[in-house]
Structure formats: C-alpha cells, structure tokens
Amino acid sequence: MHIDDLSRRIDFLREIDRLKSVIRQSPLLDASRKENSAEHSWHLAMYALVLADYATGAVDITRVMKMLLIHDIVEVDAGDMPIHGASNANQMDLEQQAAARIFGLLPDAANREFSQLWREFEAAESDEAQFAKALDRFQPLLVNVFTQGGTWSENHVRYEQVLERYGPTIQRGAPVLWELAHRWVASHFSVVDVTNAVT
C-alpha cells in the first residue's frame, strides 16, 4: 500500500477520535454519566450483530454494522442532534458538509464507500438502512425505559410523542423489536391499552 494512502487512513482515524468528545443526551444504563457518540456507534454495531435475526427481510449484517459505525461520524463537526429538544433547521447541511470533509480525508475509494454508506443510512430506503435506523431508535428507547425515563423525563416527553418519534422507524426495520418496545413504553407511561401499536 502506498505510504500516502496509509497516511490518509491514519489521518482519518485520528480525526474521528474526536467523536469520543461528542456527548449525547442519553445516559449510560447505570446513569453514571451521559454516553458519547463513539460509544453509541459501537453499541449499535453490537445491537446489529446480536439482533440481526429481527431485521425485516434478509439483510447483509456486515453492511448494517458498517453503517452504524460511521453514521454519526459527521457529529465531529455538526454535533449531536437529539431526538428530543431543540432542533437545528440547518442540521442536514452541516452534516453533509461534515461528511464531505471527514470522509474526504480518506483515499478516494474509501471516501466513496463511506460516503455512500452514510447517504444510504440517511435515506433509509434499503433493508439494511431501515434496520440500522430501527436500531438507532431502539437503543435510546431501551436506555430511556431502563433509566426510569432518562431523556423523556428531562424533556417532558409524552407517551404519544414516543410512539410518533420511535414507532414508525423501529416498526419499519424491525417489527418484532417494536412489539417489545411498545410494551415497554406503555408500561413506563402506565398505559393500559397497548393494542394499537404504531404501524
């Protein structure tokens, strides 16, 4: 491998170390601190590996794991956009600029591969991207349930908002996970009738 190619790969790896400093709203399950985006990405890749059998359709799990490992790299520049709380209308522009800069550190072939995987995840049209997106919603939902409300309590999120913000994405990519998650959410909010799950 050419030395310049290797140097560019090392530069990229050094740059994405900054993802460890991007703090998310979600706490760790032991509630000792907030998780960072690098931890989130690693944990989602593990979710994909462990929960692969629950994807809608047959998915290439290696491709899903790649998407999940890179999907938040843009937060090095753009920061985390939490699902609850204030939103930034320019977030997609910021993320596209970040993707161009950060993936552009890589050699051309790797830049194209990572950029394509990131765009595929964002578009959520392929089975792999839909499963990846489902896991990206399922993991923070699980954290909120098992930390007695987590960010839901902090942001005064209601039951209906949880169904709206998490349900369709999880249902689309992993219906069985949504069935479980919906029961957790209903129990958390003390909702008796759980027969009308989001579809």
Image (cartoon, helix red, strand yellow):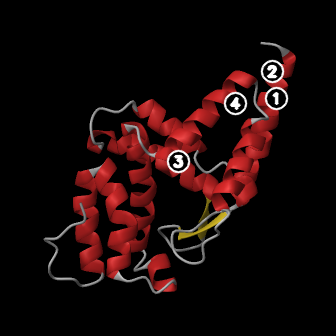
Residue that badge 2 annotates: 5
Is the C terminus in the top left, top right, bottom left or bottom right quadrant?
Answer: bottom left
Q: Nearer the viewer, residue 42 or 151?
A: 151
Label 2 amino acid?
Answer: Asp
Q: Residue at x 33, y 48 (%)?
A: 173
Label 4 to label 3, Cα distance in Å?
A: 16 Å
- Furthest residue to the top? 1
Please identify, in this view, whether the residue under mark 4 or under mark 3 is nearer the observer: 3
In the displayed structure, 64 sits above or below 169; it is above
Residue 160's disc number: none
- Examine the rendering and report whether any part of residue 34 can be seen: yes
Q: Is residue 111 left or right of residue 48?
A: right
Give the percent coordinates (x, y) of residue 20: 69, 55
User: Callout 3: helix, strand or loop?
Assistant: helix
Residue contact between numbered discs 1 and 2, judged by CB atoms under 8 Å: yes
Quarter assignment of residue 194:
bottom left
Q: Residue at x 33, y 45 (%)?
A: 51
Q: Residue at x 38, y 45 (%)?
A: 131
Label 4 amino acid?
Answer: Asn
Mark 3 or 1, nearer chain start:
1
Residue 122's disc number: 3
Mark 2 closeness class: few <14, some 14–19, many ≥20 residues within 10 Å: few
Label 1 amino acid?
Answer: Arg
Residue that badge 4 annotates: 111
Label 3 to label 2, Cα distance in Å?
A: 28 Å
Q: Nearer the viewer, residue 174 or 36?
A: 174
Label 3 amino acid?
Answer: Glu
Mark 3 closeness class: few <14, some 14–19, many ≥20 residues within 10 Å: some
Mark 4 or 3, nearer chain start:
4
Is the N terminus in the top left, top right, bottom left or bottom right quadrant?
Answer: top right
